[in-house]
Amino acid sequence: MSELSAQQLSALRAAMDGRPVRWSSPRSGDYDGRDRTLEVFNADAGEQRELLRRIRVIRGDLEQAAGGPVVVVFHTRKESARLYSEFVAEALSPIIDGVGR
């Protein structure tokens, strides 16, 4: 999987209203497509359909970067805080010296 360009990453963040996003890490014995899974955090059930619509616009770029069809996994705010609080806090922290984390 290749990295998203700065422009693609900016478009993805804008489409997700600034929510933290990341490519999922492959794990041994996991499901087919884990290496092409985009995780979106702080997305409650009522927001997910609209977020999928927004992703549709840039899905081609995502699939090219992922090397195939993209799987999108949403994490609710409650589960984002409970299971991924460190990542979410780091992703939402302010930009330092012009370089994002």
Image (tube, rainbow, N blue to C red):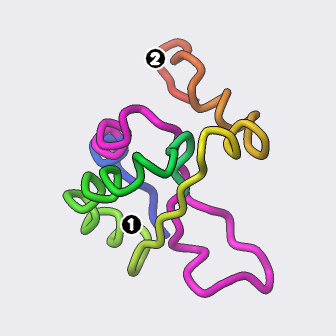
Residue 88 place in picture, x, y as percent: 65, 35
- Which mark identifies residue 86? none
Residue 42's quadrant in the figure? top right
Q: Which element is circle 1 on?
A: helix
Residue type of the residue flagged with mark 1? Ala
Residue 53's quadrant in the figure? bottom left
Asked if residue 13 is positioned above or below residue 98 in the image, the reply reads below
Q: Residue at x 33, y 58 (%)?
A: 52
Residue 30 place in picture, x, y as percent: 73, 82
Q: Residue at x 58, y 74 (%)?
A: 35
Q: CA distance from mark 2 to mark 1?
A: 24 Å
Residue type of the residue flagged with mark 2? Gly
Q: Write down the residue under mark 2.
A: 98
Residue 77 place in picture, x, y as percent: 61, 39
Q: Residue at x 55, y 81 (%)?
A: 33
Which badge, 2 or 1, comes first in the chain's sequence?
Answer: 1
Residue 69's quadrant in the figure? bottom left
Asked if residue 32 is positioned above or below residue 73 in the image, the reply reads below
Asked if residue 84 is positioned above or below residue 88 in the image, the reply reads below
Q: Crowding near pointer 2: few (<14 within 10 Å), some, many (20+)?
A: few
Question: In the figure, is residue 85 to the left or right of 4?
Answer: right
Q: Residue at x 30, y 51 (%)?
A: 50
Residues rendered magenta in the picture: 10-38
Q: Write down the residue under mark 1.
A: 65
**Residue toward you, 11 or 54:** 54
Whether the magenta-drawn stretch holds residue 17 is answered as yes
Whether the magenta-drawn stretch holds residue 78 is answered as no
Residue 27 place in picture, x, y as percent: 76, 74
Question: In the figure, is residue 27 to the left or right of 78?
Answer: right
Q: Crowding near pointer 1: few (<14 within 10 Å), some, many (20+)?
A: some
Q: Name the quarter where the C terminus is drawn.
A: top right
